[in-house]
Image (spheres, rainbow, N blue to C red):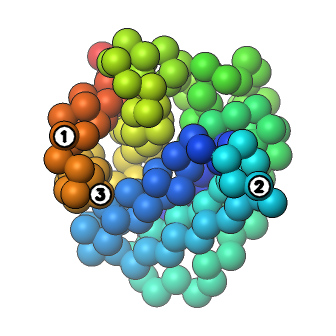
Amino acid sequence: MQDEVQFAGFGGQGIMLMGQILAQAGMEAGHEVVWIPSYGPEMRGGTAYCTVVISDRLIGSPIIRNPKHLVAMNRPSLEKFAPAVKPGGVIFINSSMINIDAGRDDVDAIKVPIIKIATDLGNIKTANIIALAAFVARSGIVDFDLLKKAVQDKFAGKQKLIPINMKALEEGRKAALGS
C-alpha cells in the first residue's frame, strides 16, 4: 500500500501544517513517510504545496508526478493539480474559495465550506484542520484517532489551542461523512 497526497493552496492557509500532521499520523501508524514542502517565490499569499507519501514499504522516490489524492485549498491549485490525480483517488475541494468542480468523474470529489465551518467554530485559523479532517475521514488514509493524536502532539506547546482543534477535527469529519 502506498498513498500520495498533494496539499496545495496559497501561503498562509496552513498547507505545510496539514502535510506535517498527516505525515506524523502516518508515522504513528508505523508506516514509512515522506513530507516534501514547496513554496512559491513569496511565502504568504504565494503558491504553497507539499506532498506526503505514506507507505507500508520503503519509499523508492519521494517525487510523485501523479498523486493518489489532492487537497485543494484554492482554485489555481485545483486547476493545476486535479488532472494529475490517479483515478479512484480523493480530491478535497475548499468550497469556500473554489466555485467549480474537480472536472473528473473517476475520483471521489468532496466539497466542504471550511471557512464557514471555521467561522462558526469561532476561529478562522482552524480551517486547515477542518480540511485535513474531512480529507482523512473520506479517504481513510490513516486512522482518525491517529490523526487526533498527531494534532494534539503538534499543538502540545500551545495547550490552549488543542480543544478548538479537536472540535475542528470533529466538524471536518462530520462534513465529510455527512453526519
Quadrant of the rendered image containing residue 74: top right
Instruction: Check disc 2: other Cα within 10 Å, few if <14, some if 14-19, many if 20+.
Output: few
Q: Nearer the viewer, mark 3 or mark 2?
A: 2
Q: Nearer the viewer, mark 3 or mark 1?
A: 1
**Residue 9 x %, y %:** 67, 43
Residue linked to disc 1: 160
In this figure, what is the number of numbered marks? 3
Residue 54, can we see it? yes
Residue linked to disc 3: 154
Residue depicted at x 25% and y 31% = 164
> Callout 3, which amino acid?
Lys
Quadrant of the rendering where the C terminus is positioned: top left
Is residue 120 depicted above or below 51 in this figure? above
Quadrant of the rendered image containing residue 13: top right
Circles 3 and 1: CB atoms closer than 8 Å: no
User: Label 1 vs label 2: CA separation?
Assistant: 30 Å
User: Label 3 vs label 1: CA separation?
Assistant: 12 Å
Mark 3 vs mark 1: which is more N-terminal? Answer: 3
> Callout 1, which amino acid?
Lys
**Residue 72 x %, y %:** 64, 40
Mark 1 vs mark 2: which is more N-terminal? Answer: 2
Residue linked to disc 2: 42
Quadrant of the rendering where the N terminus is positioned: bottom left
Instruction: Check disc 1: other Cα within 10 Å, few if <14, some if 14-19, many if 20+.
Output: few
